[in-house]
Amino acid sequence: MTVRVVLVDDQTLVRTGFRLVLDETGDIEVVGEAANGSQALDVVAATRPDVVLMDVRMPGLDGIEATRRIRSGPHPARVIILTTFDLDEYVLAGLRAGASGFLLKDALAADLVSAVRVVAAGEAVAAPSVTRRLIAHYLGTAPSRPVADERLAALTGREQEVLTLVTHGLSNVEIAAALFLSESTVKTHLGRIFAKLDLRDRVQAVILGYECGLGAPGQPSR
């Protein structure tokens, strides 16, 4: 299946570079481009892409508000935030607005392609080291919560085990191996966790896991 992508950045050179990389894949098609958030809303409405690569610092309607409107609209494409710095207030705001992750503008071509495919498949994308710093920053500004969080009571024992391993940065394949489950079973557990806890994606699950004491920023992921 072809992944349909819209590129949103006020720099033509950036959009051209991303298009050249993605057009070489064979399974990813760039179906539209926009130079600001307002144009992005129109292009997304017209093309109904699977994934939007969204810059945040643009004139007029910025990428954060554009992301929020896309995610709450009738055709909520998944959004990857593009940033020059690996951790700033724009990334945090973008994730809260509904983005599925973020990518540095100087990322390798292979990382760009991988990010698009991963997000199109319903996963979140962010480098583990950056994610740990992001969550540490988030927890540093968020109100503290008790370790025995009542939200976890909605989960079965197995679902709590899966959430704990997600919090520590394990992939679905690694969780399956650790718990002697199939990868499809892990995906089923994750879907139920997201539904029960009203979570959008894996990034939100990791943040909640840290809040509930299932891990701590700076701990090794394995």
Image (cartoon, helix red, strand yellow):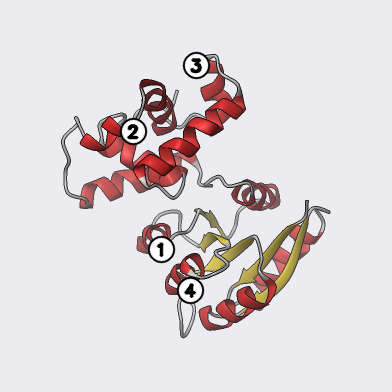
User: What residue is disc 1 on?
Assistant: 97
Q: Secondary structure at mark 3?
A: helix
Q: CA–CA distance between discs 2 and 1?
A: 25 Å
Instruction: Name which residue lies at 29% across and 49% down.
Output: 137
Residue bearing mark 2: 218
**Marks 4, 3: nearer the viewer:** 3
Q: Are marks 1 and 3 in contact (CB under 8 Å)?
A: no
- Tell me which label, 2 or 4, sits earlier in the chain: 4
Counting from the top left corner in percent of width and height, residue 106 is at 59, 57
**Distance (Cα) linking label 4 and label 1:** 9 Å
- Inspect the image, locate mark 1, and give the three-letter code of the amino acid beneath it: Ala
Could you tell me which residue is drawn at 52 percent across and 47 percent down? 124
* Inter-mark Cα distance, 4 to 3: 40 Å
- Residue 74 appears at what percent x and percent y? 54, 69
Instruction: Identify residue for label 3.
Output: 179
7 versus 110 height, above or below: below
Image mark for residue 66:
4
Kindly identify the amino acid type of the residue bearing the numbered disc 3: Leu
Left or right of 127? Residue 11 is: right
Q: State which tag comes first along the sequence, 4 or 1.
A: 4
Q: Of label 2 and label 1, which has the lower sequence position?
A: 1
Query: Considering only vertical position in the picture, is 222 above or below 51?
Result: above
Q: Which mark is residue 152?
A: none
